[in-house]
Amino acid sequence: MSDKYSNFTLQEMMAVAAAREIKDGEKVIIGTGLPLLGAFLAQKTHAPNMVAIYESGAIDCKPMVTPFSVADSVLVPGSAMQGGLMEGLGVVHAGDLDVGFLGGAQIDKYGNLNTHVIGNYRSPKVRFAGSGGSNDIGAGCKRTVVMMLQQKQRFPEKVDFVTTPGYFSGGKEREKYGFYGNGPSVVISTMGILRFDPETKEMYLESYHPGVKIEDIKANTGWDLKIAKNVRETERPAPELIRILREECDPTGVFLKKAE
Amino acid sequence: MKKSKVMTAKEAVSQFIQDGMTVGVGGFFHSISYALTHEIIRQKRKHLTICQPSFNEHADQMIGAGCVDRIISSYVWMEVFGPLYCFRRAMEKGVPHKIEMEDYTNFAVMARYLAGALGIPYIPINSMKGSDMVNYSAWMGENKAKVVKDPFGSGYEHVLVPALQPEVGYFHCQRADEEGNSQMWGIWGDMPWSMRACKKVIVSCEEIVPRELIGRDPNRTIVPAYKVVAVVPSPFGAHPKHCQGYYDVDRDFIFKYIRESRTPDGWQKFMDEWVYGVADRNEYIKKFIDDAGIKKYLDLKAKDISCTSVNYGF
């Protein structure tokens, strides 16, 4: 493999990390941007039988070109089934899906997500979009994969508003709600990969991305972040994966910025 | 032959959408009636409660124009394109005036519509449980959502949300007949449940087709004529959004709106040009072609990816 694909951007590495979270045969609801590229990459490599589902009601999509939006018209021709929100989110609500991708303005120590406000709900400093399908996906999908920009204010100890519950205050608290979904399994941040302790449900650092120091990640987290005993560098993507990502998943550069 | 309900956007809005009404808006990114939205703005409707699972710039334009007091939704944003500044100014600073929003989830609004369409008073959902959306409400107070113990003994609590039945709804689809039998394909968005839940429906469409053509493919009909009070022929009526089989989304135009609406002055300038400055959709199309060029207009036109027909024989 030429050098062309041995260098990779942070964005590309996060898309590869997202792909690794998907197992073959799983039913996955995907958004736009990196989750979309991650899911496409998974489908083109280790998970050819993945079923791609969009909130807009497209089930088992095989788009001819990279979709820009979750409701792009390119999603429709070639899909196994096309409906609307009731179809796209109905299957999520029913607990049929394995994986859902989420993002947000804030995530806290126990994986609770906020996509509503920064500050007070009634007089917000910044108002964001709202839940959209985020809360539905968090409640219904067996596990969720969260992709986040890692900054201290985005990783507070407690979110300003709970849009999509993670593990509430930790431990077994989530279990009493009877969700079909078991909660977030991983946070792929711009600095590292974080998971949740099986007992306490507290988020911890599993790996740091190449070039990022553990102190930097701690400094960009709003609580005293625990570090895995066997913490390591995030696995670097194989050049072949970078080639597929650039040449097959996003050949026109809809989402991927060109590597420097 | 039944009575034709075909009329202009101007006539439909002036007859059926009044100040203070609760209005259901149809679509999910795809096939949103900008033809009717812009007419509502030109006719300066006030104090509307607008409802849609996910809103985009059409809501932002109505909010900026002062048409909206209340929003029932889960989302007001334009996805990867960016934020909607009139919505943010209204929610953060009360500009041009304060608005209220009842925050639900995308599915929860659909569930409210489903209950409305089926004529049942409320519906239990799995979403929203344990979130701050059940702890905070706006004008609906404790009637926004209720958390109740499952009376059938699962041991869990569930969130109940009330039926939503807007006084009037409007949406855009590919084709309808003169009575209002409306056919839509591609991404249905909140249809058919949103429009079936509305008491009255205004449809804007790319084409008017004969009733006979509707009957050749009745599985594609999403709203029957008896719900529909007005049929507004509006080719290119969803621009800058897409309409499957007719034209693609105009990303440049959406980015332009978001860029210009960053300031109230920029927003006003955009609206003077594209909404207040045109009398109707025909003038809008003419202006679009003059402005963007015929090539851009033709580039947006959909490719032909037609399906095979099926046999409805008996």
Image: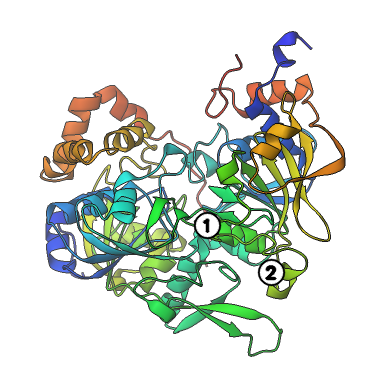
Q: Is residue B238 above or below residue A192?
A: below
Residue B218 in which image quadrant: bottom left
Badge 2 sits on which subunit?
A
User: Can you give x and y, in whole percent of width and height, for residue B264 in the image?
Assistant: 22, 41
Q: Is residue B8 visible?
A: no
In space, the residues marked 1 and 2 are separated at their CA atoms by 23 Å
User: Can you give x and y, in whole percent of width and height, for residue B174 in the image?
Assistant: 35, 50
Disc number placed over residue A52 in the picture, else none: none
Disc number placed over residue A160 in the picture, else none: 1
Left or right: A33, with A140 as reference point: left
The residue positioned 38% from the left and 61% from the top of the image is B52
Front-lying residue, A193 or A46? A193
Residue B167 in which image quadrant: bottom left
**Callout 2 secondary element:** loop
Q: Which residue is mark 2?
A: A179
The residue positioned 54% from the left and 60% from the top of the image is A163
User: Can you give x and y, in whole percent of width and height, for residue A12 in the image?
Assistant: 66, 27
Q: Is residue A138 above or below residue B153?
A: above
The residue positioned 41% from the left and 39% from the top of the image is B82
Q: Is residue A210 above or below residue B225?
A: above
**Callout 1 secondary element:** loop
User: Can you give x and y, in whole percent of width and height, for residue B213 in the image?
Assistant: 35, 57
Badge 1 sits on which subunit?
A
Amino acid type of the residue that numbered disc 1 sits on in the rendered structure: Asp
Look at the image and tell me in which quarter the N terminus of chain B lies. Answer: bottom left
Is the residue under label 2 in contact with that under label 1 (CB below 8 Å)? Answer: no
Front-lying residue, B116 or A82? B116
